[in-house]
């Protein structure tokens, strides 16, 4: 359920972004709704509400949530301030690369890799498998960031679709691949 809640700001952004721009009157003030700039505004508002609510409820945010919130406010704020969606296009690549650096750094800092810390409560794997899985996440986040950047600045008309659906599908496929790798080693351990 928590992972689904994390998608609310993205769904709100996608929905508003895809609307044909129109003027909406609220309290005697007119606002444009639809397109990249208002989509960005709604993304920031939805992110603050979702992650603020999560923080109030849990008294903490996961590191990935905090990074995402800061990136949304920073890049979304610059998008609004300069009325230029190119700032927002940099958010996904940079967040993915931050995650890649975090996974890579965990290879050298601490006793366990980041993927092991996140998953060892559910499964037991040999140390070298944890290291390989962790490195595969480094490669995945690096390539996903590059793909987001490439699509955003090469295929402008598809970047939002790729950001929402392409990234989600690629992540899902990568997780399935990871599961196949894990299941092979779990079966080997049980024998």
Image (tube, helix red, strand yellow):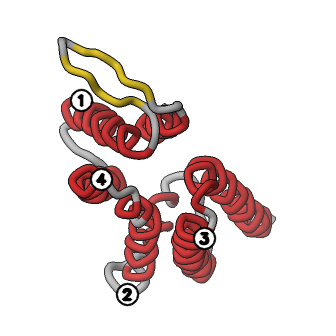
**Which residue is disc 4 drawn over?**
83
For disc 2, the marked residue is: 108
Which residue corresponds to mark 3? 154
In the picture provided, is 55 more to the left or to the right than 103? left
Residue 175 position in % (x across, y down): 66, 58
- N-terminal of the pair, mark 1 or mark 3, is 1
Along the polypeptide, which appears first: circle 4 or circle 2? 4
Would you say the residues marked 2 and 3 are in contact, meaning their CB atoms lie under 8 Å apart?
no
Q: Between residue 157 and residue 123, name the one nearer to us.
A: 157
Q: Is residue 22 visible?
A: yes
Q: Quick one: label 2, few (<14), some, or many (20+) residues within 10 Å?
A: few
Q: Is residue 134 visible?
A: no
Q: What residue does disc 1 label? A: 57
How far apart marks 1 and 2 lie (CA) works out to 33 Å
Labels 2 and 3: the sequence-earlier one? 2
The residue furthest top is 27
Residues at discs 1 and 2 in contact (Cβ within 8 Å): no
Numbered mark located on residue 43 in the image: none
Q: Position of residue 53 (x, y in %)?
A: 25, 30
Q: Tag 1's secondary structure?
A: helix
Disc number lying in front (1 or 3)? 3
- Alpha-carbon neighbours of circle 4 within 10 Å: few (<14), some, or many (≥20)? some
């Amino acid at each position: 359920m928590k992972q689904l809640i994390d998608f609310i700001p993205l769904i709100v952004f996608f929905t508003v972004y895809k609307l044909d721009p129109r003027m909406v009157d609220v309290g005697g003030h007119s606002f444009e709704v639809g397109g990249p700039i208002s989509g960005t505004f709604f993304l920031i508002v939805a992110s603050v509400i979702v992650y603020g609510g999560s923080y109030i409820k849990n008294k903490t945010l996961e590191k990935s949530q905090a990074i995402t919130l800061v990136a949304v406010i920073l890049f979304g704020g610059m998008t609004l301030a300069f009325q230029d969606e190119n700032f927002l296009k940099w958010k996904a690549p940079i967040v993915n690369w931050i995650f890649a650096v975090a996974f890579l750094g965990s290879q050298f800092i601490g006793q366990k890799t980041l993927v092991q810390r996140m998953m060892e409560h559910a499964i037991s794997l040999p140390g070298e498998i944890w290291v390989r899985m962790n490195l595969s996440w480094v490669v995945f986040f690096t390539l996903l960031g590059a793909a987001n950047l490439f699509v955003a600045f090469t295929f402008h008309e598809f970047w939002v679709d790729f950001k929402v659906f392409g990234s989600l599908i690629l992540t899902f496929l990568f997780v399935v691949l990871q599961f196949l790798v894990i299941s092979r080693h779990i079966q080997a351990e049980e024998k």
